[in-house]
Image (cartoon, grey):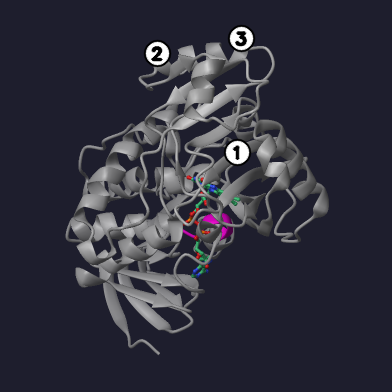
Amino acid sequence: MPRAATADVVVVGAGIIGAACAEALTAAGVRVIVVDRGAVASGTTASGEGNVLVSDKEPGPELELAIASRAEWGVVLDRLPSRVADVEWESKGGVVVATTDPGPLRAFAAKQQAAGVDARVITAAEAFSLEPLLTRDVTVGVHYPEDAQLQPVLAATALLTAVRDRGGEVWSGVTGLSVRRSAQGRLIGLSTSAGEIACGAVLNACGPWAGEFGATAGGPIQVLPRRGMILVTAPLPECVRHKVYDADYVGAVGSGDADLQTSTVVESTRAGTVLIGSSRERIGFDDSVRVKVLRELARKAVGLFPFLGDVPVMRAYGGFRPYAPDHLPVIGPDPRVEGLWHATGHEGAGIGLAASTGRLITELFLGLAPHVAPEPFRVDRPAVIAA
Ligand SMILES: Cc1cc2nc3c(=O)[nH]c(=O)nc-3n(C[C@H](O)[C@H](O)[C@H](O)COP(=O)(O)OP(=O)(O)OC[C@H]3O[C@@H](n4cnc5c(N)ncnc54)[C@H](O)[C@@H]3O)c2cc1C
């Protein structure tokens, strides 16, 4: 059992968000302990496909954070210890295609171009030269050279290795139970299943469980699980070169609908497997793998890449996206408990948004000028503060 300890900040949750925040804080000289009730990256981060995307976001605060984070990932990867810096980063680019009316996709790309995204409208023939195995039903495409990919578990592990190298600690198998407060109400410590940690701040990075931990800490927030499932093929020879998805994906990402939604997202990994996603459903923490979801994923993927109908599937898995009702992350101090902070609610984009989230938390914590406007992500917005 770890001994009694002190830190400037205790990060609760060792997923990609907690890891990125801890890394950025320690890079700035802040003393950090990270606790997770499971293993590193054993929550939603283990389910993430690893896309670092600008292509799937409407112009607005989340896109601004995504553009900043795409750049920040380069900075973060450069300062990782070389022995763990290979996190399977690939600047592979994304290709979005429409198989029906090309108008909406063209209009979406125009809005993104105006917001500073490198979004190149391409013909069907150009889409085939980028992705030779695509369905011939494509009517128009958009190429996003900035879209990238990494391996989320490797990335979280590497970030926490950097934390340890700088004197920080990572306690696995340790649950954050409650916060301790002074007579004036200021947070002065965290009680854990392995003892007390005296600290000046606690950062709630509990992903889909952040609502639960926030309530325990005196700062309840509306963060809910949104289930997603992925089909994984056996390793294949090179067949899908970019992250490829159907134009209806953006609508599913932005929808608040609780019912099952599926939209095709197909990409290969360095290991040769092809990931076929993704579904979105609000069904609480129900983790059953259901045939009706897998059938929809497979049907739509084969529509986009007909060859997938004949390849072996190796497994299927799911996870819970941490979802705030207004689809924006929750990043910053909790006005109700001095010393309590939150970094959560990244829904289906936490891997991509982690680098800038870590930087923003660090800037706010140290009182530095933030590199992106923090207001849209503040904790005390009506959609997030639980009644
Ligand atoms: C199928 C699927 C595909 C996805 N694909 C992508 C993608 O391609 N790109 C992308 O950017 N995002 C993707 N996402 C979303 C992304 O995975 C999440 O946004 C991200 O992983 C959230 O990270 P997190 O650190 O907030 O949460 P988590 O990874 O869940 O980490 C939270 C941690 O908190 C710990 N914890 C909870 N309560 C306590 C407590 N009381 N004490 C101690 N520890 C506690 C948990 O054990 C867990 O390890 C996908 C999600 C799913 C489900």
Label 2 residue SS: helix
Q: In this view, does 290 lie above or below 268?
A: below
Q: Name the residue under label 1.
A: 265
- For numbered disc 3, what is the local secondary structure? helix
Q: Distance between the residues labelled 3 and 1?
A: 20 Å
Left/right of residue 259 with respect to residue 371 in the rendered view: right
For the point 64% across and 27% down, the residue is 251
Upstream in the sequence, badge 1 or badge 2? 2
Rendering coords of residue 214 (x, y %): 52, 59
List the residue tagged with mark 2.
114
Mark 1: amino acid: Val
Q: Is mark 3 within 8 Å of ligand 1?
A: no
Badge 2 local density, few (<14 within 10 Å), some, or many (20+)? few
* Cα–Cα span, label 1 and label 2: 25 Å
Q: Looking at numbered disc 2 in the image, what kind of residue is underneath it?
A: Ala
Q: Distance between the residues labelled 3 and 2?
A: 17 Å
In the rendering, at what x and y percent does residue 348 appear?
55, 44
Image quadrant of residue 155?
bottom left
Q: Disc 3 residue type? A: Gly
Is 93 colored magenta in this rendering? no
Q: Position of residue 381 (x, y in %)?
A: 50, 37
Q: Residue at x 33, y 31 (%)?
A: 373
Task: Kindly indicate whether the residue at mark 1 contacts the one at mark 3 (C-beta within 8 angstroms).
Answer: no
Q: Which residue is pictured at 79% across the width and 55% down the height?
A: 290
